[in-house]
Image (cartoon, rainbow, N blue to C red):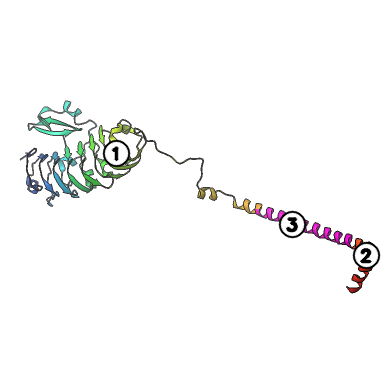
Amino acid sequence: MEVLNLGNNQIIDIFPSWVEALSKLRIFILKSNKFYGPITLSQINQSFSMLQIMDLSSNSFTGGLPSNMFQSWNAMTREDKSQSTFLGRILNAPRSTLYYQDTVIVMIKGKERELTKILAIFTSIDLSNNHFQGDIPESIGIVKSLHLLNMSNNGFTGQIPTSLENLMVLESLDLSQNNISGEILWQLTKLTFLSVLNLSQNNLMGSMPQIKQFLTFMNESFLGNMGLCGPPLSRKCIAPPSDLLSFEDATSELDWEFMWIGFGVGCGAGMGVLFWTLTLWTKGRREFYKFVDGMLLVNFPSTMFALKSRS
């Protein structure tokens, strides 16, 4: 079996782990059902080795994604050396190797598209509209030939995994409506094929990368992240004034040797003034006493004689 499409039903069940035994499975769709519970995978090394399209969207899956979820997805892990997108390669590849004859509806860059013939080079993962939690595993960087990734409307936390920089042919990335925090990684600027990006309604913060195709994304791609600033957002980044130094910076730049010299000069001058003041005050007091004694001697000679004889 190469195609298993159970989408748009009313199936109530847990994740069908028995699907892993389908070694030739290329398309696996469970979207718009009532599946619930965590995704459980066995330790089979060849699980989903031929898988190109997985769509588990619009169910009630919970828990975190298994760390080994993408490790054996060989059809998505082959590194694509081509410099053209999968849409561009339609014109160049031999028609006999381009298509499968199966029909499926997938979400392509935010819109549902019916693929009447599946491209042999088309790869897509859609886990949107569930209740997944925890960090997005770094192992997502293994699927290097992935074109579309949608993990929107879940409860993912943590930061954007740095391993996304390995998805060099990724054309559409939707991580909106989660609880992802931290900064927008500069590594995402390496994804030069990325034409659709939605990081809105998260807890991202910091300044926007001002490089390459990030300059082409609109404001709507980043709405609801109150900590983000810089173009294309209307919220400007507030930088600290460059002409004002903090207290530590200011005190570290003081010339302490100069301060001590100034302190010494100031103290010396102060002591000199004090000494001069005391000298003048003593001399003045002596002159005053001489004047008083002279007055007493002239006006009261008998009293002065008595005081001198008594002393």
Q: Looking at this rendering, what residue extends furthest in the top direction? A: 91
- Residue 74 visible: yes
Classified by dominant secondary structure, the portion drawn in magenta counts as: helix
| Magenta-colored span | 263-292
For the point 30% across and 45% down, the residue is: 181
**Label 3, on which residue?**
274
Q: Of marks 3 and 2, which one's residue comes earlier in the chain? A: 3
Between the C-alphas of marks 2 and 1, the distance is 103 Å
The kind of residue tagged 3 is: Leu
Q: Residues within 10 Å of mark 2 (few under 14, many from 20)?
A: few
**Label 2, on which residue?**
300
For the point 20% across and 33% down, the residue is: 110
For the point 60% across and 52% down, the residue is: 256
As for residue 287 lying within the magenta part, the answer is yes
Query: Count the marks: how many?
Result: 3
Q: Position of residue 121 (x, y in %)?
A: 15, 34
Q: Quadrant of residue 177?
A: top left
Tag shown at residue 224 = 1
For the point 11% across and 27% down, the residue is: 95
